């Protein structure tokens, strides 16, 4: 009995330690009605039923100020309050062509971050291959679309991914930066669970967000508590006084899916970035159907005009059959039907 009590107390101590490391909330399980205390012969150190500690995984113990709110209430609620400020967050693009949408979404988050810390710059880290494939953000459009001055966005181009990871780890611990963005391509072996744990720990120590952008990367186990899947969404027409302008391109739009979160709640949202207000706006499902009427196929009904019958079916000889390889004499044209230029020439 004494050994059992010691083992249980060791398990409870380990659970408390794990809860402290993960930031989860330990709860005490109240004794059910009619439950009796510990038996009389039990060890004095054995906890009774009312003293059992249960670790609840999921929501972390944090204040609302610890999260970067996107301004979209359903998305922030699904994320448990928003993107954590002092943590590593992943933003994935399923294909290489989604690199522009992923970069635009990251710039939108950087705009929200810099609005709260206008005096601190954002460092964007990538390899030479990344910047050759996806390019650099256009400095002239940063101020107009996102309200980011060119001097607020710094770039670091590394020759190798190993160098980019080292720069990201060193930059993540600097409190002078508002945020650190690390962009990679694919699923490199060097970016394993240990590397992401180091980035996550640096972000927690500095109290600054680290955004990991992944081009055409697969979902792998990482230390990031949040993973978002971002792709481009069809833009609506430019809004005018008379209504949407036909044939025009309106605000940038993103399709954001939750691949991993603290609450483990799935969800998919279509967000538009307002370049005037520098804020996100959600597009409802009704608006999606109205902007793309071809996406929804109407149910089949009884129509007065059925589909026309198919035409006449012709049978052609198969390749290699005698009809194609050895024609008969009757298939050849007669002598008077042959063209004049194919008649044999007379000598002399």
Image (spheres, rainbow, N blue to C red):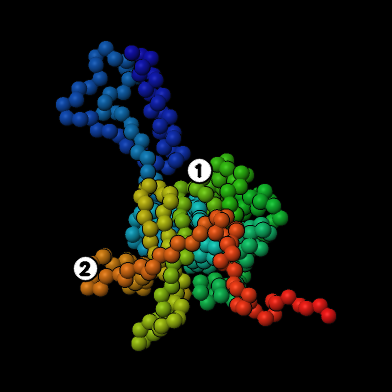
Q: x%, y% of residue 202? A: 56, 48
Task: Indicate the quadrant where residue 183 lies.
Answer: bottom right
Residue 337 appears in the picture as rendered: yes
Left/right placement of residue 306 relative to residue 239 reads left
Depth check, front residue: 217 or 263: 217
Q: In the orientation shown, which residue stands out farthest toward the right?
A: 348
Q: x%, y% of residue 191? A: 59, 46
* Vertical comparison of 59 with 15: above or below: below
Seen at 43% across and 60% down, the residue is: 256
Seen at 24% across and 33% down, the residue is: 30
Depth check, front residue: 302 or 209: 302
Left/right placement of residue 238 relative to residue 146 reads left
Q: What element carries label 2?
A: loop
User: Which quadrant is the C terminus positioned in?
Assistant: bottom right
Task: Indicate the quadrant where residue 313 lies.
Answer: bottom left
Q: Which mark is residue 28?
A: none
Mark 2 lies on residue:
302
Q: Which mark is residue 221?
A: 1
Task: Indicate the quadrant where residue 288 lies.
Answer: bottom left
């Amino acid at each position: 009995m004494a050994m059992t009590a010691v083992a249980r107390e060791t398990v409870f101590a380990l659970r408390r330690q794990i809860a402290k490391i993960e930031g989860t909330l330990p709860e005490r399980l109240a004794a059910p009605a009619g439950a009796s205390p510990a038996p009389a012969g039990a060890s004095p150190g054995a906890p009774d039923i009312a003293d059992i500690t249960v670790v609840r995984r999921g929501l972390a113990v944090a204040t609302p100020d610890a999260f970067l709110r996107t301004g979209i209430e359903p998305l922030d609620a699904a994320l448990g309050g928003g993107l954590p400020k002092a943590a590593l967050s992943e933003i994935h693009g399923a294909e290489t062509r989604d690199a522009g949408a992923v970069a635009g979404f990251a710039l939108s988050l950087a705009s929200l971050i810099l609005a709260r810390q206008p005096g601190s710059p954002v460092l964007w880290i990538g390899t030479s291959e990344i910047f050759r494939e996806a390019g650099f953000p256009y400095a002239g459009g940063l101020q107009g679309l996102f309200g980011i001055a060119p001097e607020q966005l710094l770039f670091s181009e590394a020759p190798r991914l190993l160098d980019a990871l080292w720069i990201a780890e060193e930059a993540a611990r600097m409190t002078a930066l508002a945020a650190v963005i690390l962009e990679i391509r694919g699923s490199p072996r060097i970016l394993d669970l240990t590397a992401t744990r180091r980035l996550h720990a640096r972000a927690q120590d500095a109290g600054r967000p680290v955004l990991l952008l992944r081009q055409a990367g697969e979902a792998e186990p990482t230390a990031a508590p949040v993973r978002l899947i971002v792709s481009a969404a069809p833009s609506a027409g430019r809004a005018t006084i008379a209504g949407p302008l036909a044939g025009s391109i309106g605000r940038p739009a993103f399709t954001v899916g939750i691949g991993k979160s603290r609450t483990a709640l799935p969800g998919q949202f279509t967000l538009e970035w307002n370049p005037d207000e520098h804020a996100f706006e959600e597009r409802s499902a009704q608006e999606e159907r109205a902007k793309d009427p071809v996406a929804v196929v109407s149910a089949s009904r009884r129509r007065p005009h059925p589909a026309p019958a198919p035409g006449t079916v012709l049978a052609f000889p198969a390749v290699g059959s005698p009809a194609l390889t050895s024609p008969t004499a009757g298939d050849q044209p007669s002598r008077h039907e042959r063209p004049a230029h194919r008649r044999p020439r007379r000598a002399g």
